Image: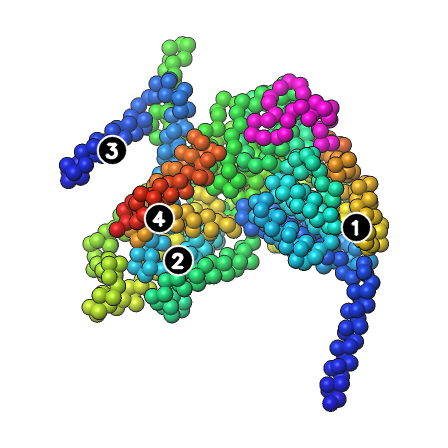
Amino acid sequence: MKRSLKTGASVIALSLVAGAAMAGGHDGPLKVGVLATLEGTYTALGEDGVRGIRTALAQAGDVAGGREIELIIQSTDTSPDSAVRGARKLVEQDGVDIVLGPLSGSEGIAIRDYSKTQPGVTFINGISGAMETTYVEPSENFFRFNTDGAQWSAGLGDYIYNEKGYETIATVGEDYSFVYTQVFGLVTEFCAAGGEVTERLWVPLGTKDFGSIIAALPDDVDAIYVGLGGGDAVNFLNQYQQAGGDANLIGGSIMVDGTVLNSKGDAKNALIGTPSSGPQADTWDDPGWQEYVKAYQDTFPPEERFPSPSLLATGYYNATSAMLQCMDTVGGDLTDGQVGFRDCLTNLTLDAPNGTITLDGNRQAIGTNFVSEVVEDDNGNLVTQLVAMKENVNQTLGIDPDAFAAIGLPSRDTPACQSSY
Amino acid sequence: MREFSRRHPVWAGVVALAVLILLYLIFAIWPEWLSDAIGSKKIFLNALFNGITLGGLYFLVASGFTLIFGLMRNVNLAHGSLYLLGGYIGFFVADWTGFWLLAFPVSFIIVGLLGVLMQIFVFRRMEGQDLRQTLVTIGISIVVADLMLWGFGGDFYNISPPSWLSGPMETNLITSQRVRNSGEVVTTYLKYPMVRIVIFAASVAIGVAMWLVLNRTRIGMLVRAGVDDRDMLSATGARIQLVFVGVFFFGAGLAGLAGVVGATFQSAAPGEDVRFLLASLVVVIVGGMGSIPGAALGALLIGLAEQFGSVYFPTYAVVLTFLIMVVVLAFRPQGLLGR
């Protein structure tokens, strides 16, 4: 009797506590869903993206606007339908308030469309970088605090033409929206500088045997731009070395990134000296960047992370930081269709580790871009070293918006190589 | 062969013509109109040889798969996981000891033993229930894939071949010849990755050895008899369970071996298991379930289709292998060399 009384009392006490939490509305834990590629070719990339989120959350003590954060991580596999399936699960089943993600280009386009059907939820892009995601029919509740693939190419075309002296190049890349966007940025700048792109080869995402592609690479060009990522990049480099390839390489942003530069084996050594560009340079001496690298290193033991954060980690870190800052601004209040929270995001000036980021009218980031070269550091790790910087890169790459629209959307052979746009 | 040409004179003529054209394409110096029409000879030769060597790798994976199916009627959908595990084991053995060659026997034995455990503790308990066994292998593959992701992470593991194997090798095949203004003739020879040649030679050797064992030894006789009629074989007093365990060991071991090969000229990473499972399924469906020569033929076809597809029509390269499978299923559902 006594025992059952005690049990009854604790049940009542527990339900009272729970009731109080429910009644408070925006006082309960904040449910945040995460979309990241934790399976398939881009597994290593997705894992580091999640590390970026955890780094930001650890700095904030897992609290945003006074509310505890409950993270729900959902894996995708770079395909648009896996991203939509994951997002549906997070929104419709778990009932999250905010989604961070996705990671890969075509996933981003699919999530933009999905976000339009869920006006009650705010989507903050992880690091997906296809241009169309925010440039075509942007969604009111989809925010992107990373620059896109074309912006990541800013400064590279100029650098390889004027500094490296490459006059003709060919490109090889994975056949999907993000790499189209990257090549778009490269071609517009490189061709305007006076260079010529003779050939563009495309391979399916997830290609493992590059033997024949490598043989088909033209040998009458000054350099070859390689826009591959994850396992595809490692396989390409491995087989490129075995085939005795010795052309000058130019790297795409996720080709010359911590995820590839830290792979196991010798394949990555083919990248030493390769110029590339992207939203960060590993060895930048800016104090804000150094502080962020240290936070990343302190959050995880050395065997569970890369020596320094990859651009995927940085992207997710920035998205999380933006969320945390705005949650603090509105005091954790997401009522009224999250209107205050979204106002804050729209007008936020994010003091990110990789330079100041603001959003344009399409909720697309305007930020800094970094041109770098791969070097071996004192510990024998491969890292990217800053050689040039370009600030305030907007989505139209400094081209007049009407002229930019006339170029067309990135695809296998758009843009054409012209001396002016 | 003579029998075949007497029975099908037209087909024999077509095959002979195809072989002649192929030999011409390989050895002749291409005239200009040919290069203009289908690209340089270098690209063609590389696609051809890459297709054959890739076929060698597919054969290693698929032969174990088809052997297990042929004898035990067990569609082992965990075969891809065994392949990937072999790759990881190979990486660590090669990394710790520094001997690339040592990775092969170690992977073969460890993965083979795992196959034995699967046979003894799982499949023997549900013998004769094909569907149940197949479903269980799906379960095992999912569990093993997650365990490997947990243990090895999402990183890409790439085994470095020893220095005598890395880099390209000069061959005697001429890819192009041009006359310079000075009258000097410049001849370019094909350079081909050494490691791929060695790997192909090794898979041919394994294939031949397997054929010899199956057709010329007592053990092979037992296995073949088991493939034909399992019940009759056990009725004659053969220790069929022992044969099952042996075949499972060998088939799984081959997958592990192939994993080392795959991690050397491609890389080991999550997702590879499914890719190679799919590849070996397509290979054995095309070649004929349970037939070793069928697996060799299927692997060659699929390897060539992938490589030629990736160069000559990249957009549809992915579809091509499945197109072959559909055509084979439509006209010869038992597979090219199936019975």
Residue at x 15% of width, y 36% of height: B6
Q: Which residue is mark 4?
A: B285
Which of these two is toward me, A193 or B78?
B78
Q: Disc 3 on helix, strand or loop? A: helix
Bounds of the magenta segment: A394-421
- Chain under label 1? A
Residue A231 image offset from top left, x and y in percent: 53, 44
Q: Disc 4 on helix, strand or loop? A: helix
Q: Mark 1 or mark 4: which is in front?
A: 1
Q: What is the distance, in whole Å, between disc 3 and disc 1 at their CAs? A: 71 Å
- The amino acid type, in three-letter code, at marker 2 is Asn
- Is A280 displayed left or right of A325 in the figure? left
Q: What is the distance, in whole Å, between disc 3 and disc 2 at their CAs? A: 35 Å
- Chain under label 2? B
Q: Which residue is mark 3?
A: B15
Quick check: do tags 3 and 2 share a chain? Answer: yes
- The amino acid type, in three-letter code, at marker 3 is Val
Where A71 falls versus A17 (above or below)?
above
Q: Which residue is mark 2?
A: B76
Residue A207 image offset from top left, x and y in percent: 49, 40
Q: Residues within 10 Å of mark 2 (few under 14, many from 20)?
A: many
Q: Are marks 3 and 2 in contact (CB under 8 Å)?
A: no
- The amino acid type, in three-letter code, at marker 4 is Ile
Q: Mark 2 or mark 4: which is in front?
A: 4
- Quarter of the image with the N terminus of chain B in it: top left
